[in-house]
């Protein structure tokens, strides 16, 4: 631990730390190196995500601040935070370097309040939650890339700030109105695999925001047969885009990894805003007579 506490790491890495931070490897105890020392750190630091609903109300998320020490603190520890724009810009640069097609940059979310700044970690404990209130997001553009980068500025009573564990980069994607949990019923045809063929109903399907009018299927195991350990071949993270040009709303569908996936043109693929239901008939591979699914997805609740 004494060789690791201050090693600088990429902001793309997400460091997960146990509450006491006294062990790094099985059977290896760091009590001796921490004896008499205390380090302030953010338990889940690096890049994190909190999806905001586009509603006219404030929303709150939280994260845990931890004191790594060999013994419980005997007095209160006060931890102060500040906004770290440099960390946000460094993370943006790393994302752009990893994917040269990316030309956008993260921007500081326009209105937020760190409700626990400073936060007090009480004597006899090692951690406390910090709550952040994000102001209403209904006027914010869905296409923007927003972030709240927070870093531990300092800590009282001689506590050292762990340099590689002091910053958290909260990415704040704004959910479109189609994101959520859906109940699905339908029929899957998967020739020549009878275990995957049949009627499905009351299964749960999650759709996550992938653009202003696009949602992405995220729980692939949903599609699998009851005994399967992975998703059905041919079905992937489908992107469903809803057009509001007419009612019901026409939809399009793309599979980023399989160009053979198509909507059946003779079926009325659509989204009904009155019932919050998506109707779609999809085929792939050898075609509609061998590999296809016709589904009804009805909104059930938040993602």
Image (cartoon, grey):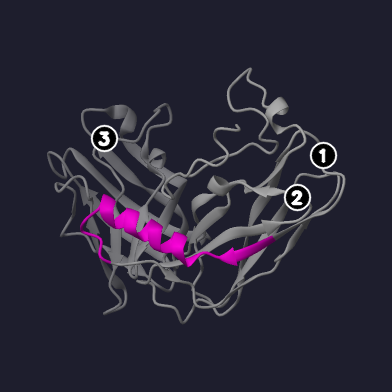
Q: Nearer the viewer, mark 2 or mark 1?
A: 2
Q: Position of residue 87 (x, y in %)?
A: 46, 59
Q: Is residue 91 above or below residue 137?
A: above
Q: Quick one: SS at disc 1?
A: loop
Q: Position of residue 266 (x, y in %)?
A: 16, 59
Which residue is at a point 53% across and 46% down the rendered structure image? 164
Q: Nearer the viewer, mark 3 or mark 1?
A: 1
Which residue is the site of mark 1?
Answer: 72
* Labelled pair 3, 1 in contact (Cβ < 8 Å): no
Mark closest to the chain's N terminus, 2 or 1 = 1
Q: Nearer the viewer, mark 3 or mark 2?
A: 2
* Labelled pair 2, 1 in contact (Cβ < 8 Å): no
Q: CA distance from mark 2 to mark 1?
A: 14 Å
Q: Which mark is residue 233?
A: 3
Residue 303 visible somewhere in the drawing: no
Which residue is the site of mark 2?
Answer: 158
Q: How many marks?
A: 3
Q: Is residue 64 above or below residue 275?
A: above
Q: Which residues are magenta?
A: 80-103
Which residue is at a point 66% across and 51% down the rendered structure image? 64
Which residue is at a point 39% across and 57% down the rendered structure image? 91
Q: Quick one: SS at disc 3?
A: loop
Q: Nearer the viewer, residue 143 or 33?
A: 33
Q: CA distance from mark 3 to mark 2?
A: 57 Å
Left or right: 122 in relation to 150: right
Q: Position of residue 124 (x, y in %)?
A: 86, 44
Q: Position of residue 254 (x, y in %)?
A: 22, 55
Which residue is at a point 21% across and 28% down the rendered structure image? 192
């Amino acid at each position: 631990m004494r060789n690791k506490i201050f090693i600088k790491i990429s902001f793309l890495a997400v460091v997960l730390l146990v509450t006491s931070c006294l062990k790094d490897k099985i059977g290896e105890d760091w009590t001796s190196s921490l004896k008499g020392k205390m380090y302030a750190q953010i338990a889940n630091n690096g890049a994190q995500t909190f999806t905001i609903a586009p509603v006219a109300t404030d929303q709150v998320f939280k994260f845990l601040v931890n004191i790594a020490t060999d013994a419980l603190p005997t007095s209160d520890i006060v931890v102060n935070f500040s906004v770290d724009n440099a960390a946000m810009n460094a993370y943006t640069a790393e994302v752009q370097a990893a994917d040269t097609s990316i030309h956008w940059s993260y921007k500081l979310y326009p209105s937020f309040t760190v409700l626990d700044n400073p936060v007090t970690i009480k004597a006899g404990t090692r951690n406390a939650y910090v709550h952040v209130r994000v102001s209403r997001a209904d006027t914010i553009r869905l296409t923007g890339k927003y972030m709240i980068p927070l870093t531990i500025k300092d800590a009282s009573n001689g506590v050292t700030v762990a340099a590689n564990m002091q910053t958290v980069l909260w990415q704040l994607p704004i959910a479109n109105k189609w994101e959520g949990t859906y109940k699905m019923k339908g029929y899957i045809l998967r020739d020549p695999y009878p275990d995957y063929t049949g009627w499905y109903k009351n299964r749960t399907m999650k759709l996550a925001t992938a653009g202003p009018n696009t949602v992405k299927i995220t729980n692939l195991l949903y599609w699998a047969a009851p005994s399967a350990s992975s998703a059905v071949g041919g079905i992937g993270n489908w992107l469903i885009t809803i057009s509001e040009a007419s009612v019901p709303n026409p939809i399009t569908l793309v599979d980023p990894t399989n160009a053979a996936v198509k909507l059946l043109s003779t079926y009325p693929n659509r989204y009904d805003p009155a019932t919050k239901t998506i109707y779609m008939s999809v085929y792939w591979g050898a075609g509609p007579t061998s590999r296809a699914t016709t589904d009804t997805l009805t909104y059930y609740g938040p993602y």
